[in-house]
Each structure stands twice: as structure tokens, then as C-alpha cells.
Image (tube, grey):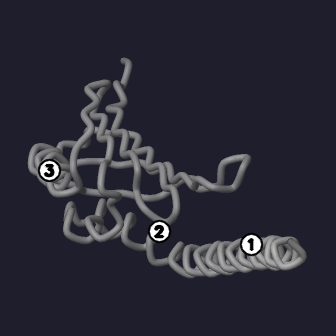
């Protein structure tokens, strides 16, 4: 009976130390992931800028999440990354870029999500506003809204 209490106490201590080790490991991974994301941010912004300036989805594709929402003029679809590539390329084919600039970027209040807002002008001088939402360094959503010029 004495041994049973000792074994139970040792097992309890082992479980506590195991849980502490797991929590410490998860914290290390989280800090490492955050560091990697912050290093990746300038590359992502540059990819967004060049991808929309050139109309080349291949520049953006490495930053697509597995599932990505693309909304063009209130028509929203959720795609696998590969299919999203084709949908965005279709937009560029129909609206070849003339100019694109990122007018604003920032983080959500919780700091987990980033966003970029850009002004896109195609070769027919049609203007669109581009919203890009990013989480954990990957593009989650691209929203394109054509701007109607009133006369």
C-alpha cells in the first residue's frame, strides 16, 4: 500500500512536469511563428504590390492560404488555393493593370490579422479598390470592388 501511494505521487509529478514541458514548447513555437510572420511581412507586402501592378497571380500564389475567399464586385466564392489562382487571373485578364498602389495597411485590434487596401486602375482607366486580409502570414481573402465614377 505504501508503494502504491509513492507510485501515485510519482506519476502525478511526472504528469505535471510533462504538462509544463508541453506548455513551454507551445509558447516557444508561438514566439517562433510570430517572429517568422513579422520577417515575412515586408515580402508579403512587396508580393501584393508587384502581383497587382503586373497582373501576375504567380507572385501572390505562394502567400495564398489553403482556402481563400475571393469577392469581385459582391460575387464571393471560396476556393482552394489552386482554383483561386485561376479566378484572380481571370480578373487580371479582363482588367489588365495600369497602376496599383497600397494606400493603407494595418493590423486588427487583436493583432492576429493584417490587412492591405490598395487602389487599382486598369488599362481602360476603370478604378477598383482592393482589400486583402491576411492571417498568420497567408492571404485569407481578396475583395475587389469597382468604383463607379459619377458624373
Q: Position of residue 123 (x, y in %)?
A: 18, 50
Q: How far apart are marks 1 and 2 (CA)?
A: 44 Å
Q: In this view, does 135 lie above or below 109?
A: below
**Nearest the eye: 23 or 80:** 23
> Which residue of the protein is positioned furthest toward the front in this rendering?
1
Q: Where is residue 133 in the image (x, y as percent from the top left)?
A: 48, 49
**Nearest the eye: 125 or 147:** 147
Q: Where is residue 108 in the image (x, y as percent from the top left)?
A: 66, 48
For image coordinates 21% across by 62% down, the residue present is: 57
Callouts 3 and 2 close, C-beta under 8 Å: no
For image coordinates 31% across by 24% down, the residue present is: 74
Q: Can residue 17 be seen in this view?
A: yes
Crowd rating for badge 2 (residues with CA inside 10 Å; few <14, some 14–19, many 20+): some
Which residue matches tag 1?
15
> Which residue of the protein is positioned furthest toward the top in this rendering?
151
Crowd rating for badge 1 (residues with CA inside 10 Å; few <14, some 14–19, many 20+): few
Q: Tell me which numbered mark, 3 or 2, is placed earlier along the sequence.
A: 2
**In front of the other: label 1 or label 2?**
1
For image coordinates 25% across by 56% down, the residue present is: 98
Using the image, tell me which numbered label, if any, was put on residue 45: 2
Which residue matches tag 3?
83
- Which quadrant is home to the C terminus? top left
- Write down the quadrant of residue 12 in the picture: bottom right
Q: Tell me which numbered mark, 3 or 1, is placed earlier along the sequence.
A: 1
For image coordinates 35% across by 49% down, the residue present is: 120
Q: Tell me which numbered mark, 1 or 2, is placed earlier along the sequence.
A: 1
Crowd rating for badge 3 (residues with CA inside 10 Å; few <14, some 14–19, many 20+): few
Q: Distance between the residues labelled 3 and 1?
A: 46 Å
Amino acid at each position: 500500500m505504501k508503494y502504491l501511494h509513492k507510485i501515485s505521487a510519482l506519476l502525478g509529478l511526472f504528469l505535471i512536469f510533462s504538462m509544463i514541458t508541453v506548455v513551454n514548447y507551445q509558447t516557444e513555437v508561438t514566439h517562433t511563428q510570430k517572429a517568422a510572420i513579422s520577417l515575412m511581412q515586408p515580402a508579403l507586402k512587396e508580393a501584393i504590390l508587384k502581383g497587382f501592378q503586373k497582373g501576375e497571380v504567380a507572385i501572390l500564389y505562394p502567400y495564398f492560404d489553403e482556402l481563400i475567399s475571393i469577392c469581385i464586385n459582391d460575387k464571393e466564392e471560396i476556393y482552394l488555393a489552386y482554383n483561386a489562382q485561376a479566378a484572380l487571373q481571370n480578373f487580371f485578364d479582363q482588367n489588365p493593370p495600369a497602376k496599383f498602389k497600397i494606400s493603407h495597411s494595418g493590423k486588427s485590434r487583436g493583432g492576429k490579422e493584417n490587412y492591405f487596401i490598395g487602389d487599382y486602375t486598369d488599362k481602360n482607366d476603370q478604378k477598383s479598390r482592393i482589400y486583402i486580409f491576411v492571417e498568420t502570414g497567408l492571404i485569407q481573402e481578396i475583395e475587389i470592388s469597382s468604383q463607379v465614377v459619377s458624373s
